[in-house]
Image (tube, rainbow, N blue to C red):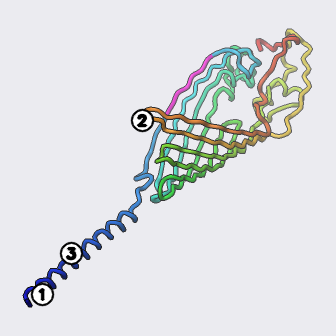
Amino acid sequence: MKKIIYTLLIWVILTIQVYGQEVIQVQKKKESKSSYKKRVLESVEMNLLSSLYTQDGENAAVTGGIGTEEIQDATATIIVSIPLNEDDVLTIDAGVSAYTSASSSNINPFDGGNDADAFIASSGESQSDVWSNISLAYSHSSDDRNRILGANLSFSSEYDYTSFGLGGSYTSLFNQKNTEFTARLSAFLDQWTLLYPSEFNSFGLSSGEEEDEEFDITKYIITGNANYSPQVSPLDDPGRNSYALGFGFSQILSKNMQASLALDVIHQRGQLSTPFQRVYFKDVANSYIQNF
């Protein structure tokens, strides 16, 4: 009888010990699973992009609808995404765009050393330009990866234009990440260098550029409509502010199909166009200096 009792006690003790070990192992697995979080971005990513854009055609806005709109634009961009921790990512986007433009080179068609002509690009300073840009974007993902908060800053500059931008966004993923909703808010605070048509310089309006100061209309013979005496005045404010509110909705319909809907509301205030655009009216005879 004692042997049976001892045997039962030993069996109970062993059973309790084995059960306890299993419970501990299950608990450790749960703790390990709950503490592990997959990183939004595992390591630093870098992308190098480049593009070449060409354009040709007539009706150039700079020369009042007369002349070519030929443009060559080469762009190089580098994008670096850096994981700050499991949830946060910092993205740096920097780029340079260099272009030559037959149309914009006729902002001052008298600076090329040859006869001014709407159909022949001058070789002055305005024939080429370099645009540079840098932007910083920060994103924070929730633990379940279904919500993303974002913020961004940007700055860009070229010969006659600078822009500073900032914004934020909120993205929500649901329906097992098959449905996505995004709301965005952004603002751009821009400044123009007001470049006026060079022929206005002799009538009290100048951009302050050295190449414009050298132009004097009294040194040229006006043909066609010789009664050329425009009434001009400088623009009040070189600034332009843009504010945008945007919404996006996308839905995965199948393995090979996705539908999306976007709505943007944009408000702009300030100088919305470049002042060197020329407009010619058919009911007034053209005035010409050389071939321009």
Q: Nearer the viewer, residue 228 or 274?
A: 274
User: What amino acid type is highlighted by mark number 1?
Assistant: Ile
Q: Tell me which residue sits at (74%, 22%) in the image.
A: 62
Would residue 53 be counted in the magenta stretch?
yes
158 versus 114 height, above or below: below
Name the image quarter holding residue 219.
top right
Earlier residue among tags 1 and 3: 1
Give the structural element (helix, strand or loop) at label 1: helix
Expressed as whole percent of the image width and height from the top left, the position of residue 16 reads 22, 79
How many tags in the picture?
Answer: 3
Q: Tell me which residue sits at (63%, 50%) in the image.
A: 168
Label 2 near label 3: C-beta < 8 Å? Answer: no
- In the picture, the disc for residue 255 is 2
Earlier residue among tags 2 and 1: 1
Left or right of 108? Residue 43 is left
3D distance between C-alphas at marks 2 and 1: 65 Å
Give the structural element (helix, strand or loop) at label 2: loop
Earlier residue among tags 3 and 2: 3
3D distance between C-alphas at marks 1 and 3: 20 Å
Q: Quadrant of the N terminus?
A: bottom left
Q: Tell me which residue sits at (63%, 46%) in the image.
A: 184
Name the image quarter holding residue 280.
top right
Q: Residues within 10 Å of mark 3 (few under 14, many from 20)?
A: few
Of marks 3 and 2, the one in the foreground: 3
Q: Please name the predominant secondary structure of the magenta segment in the image.
A: strand
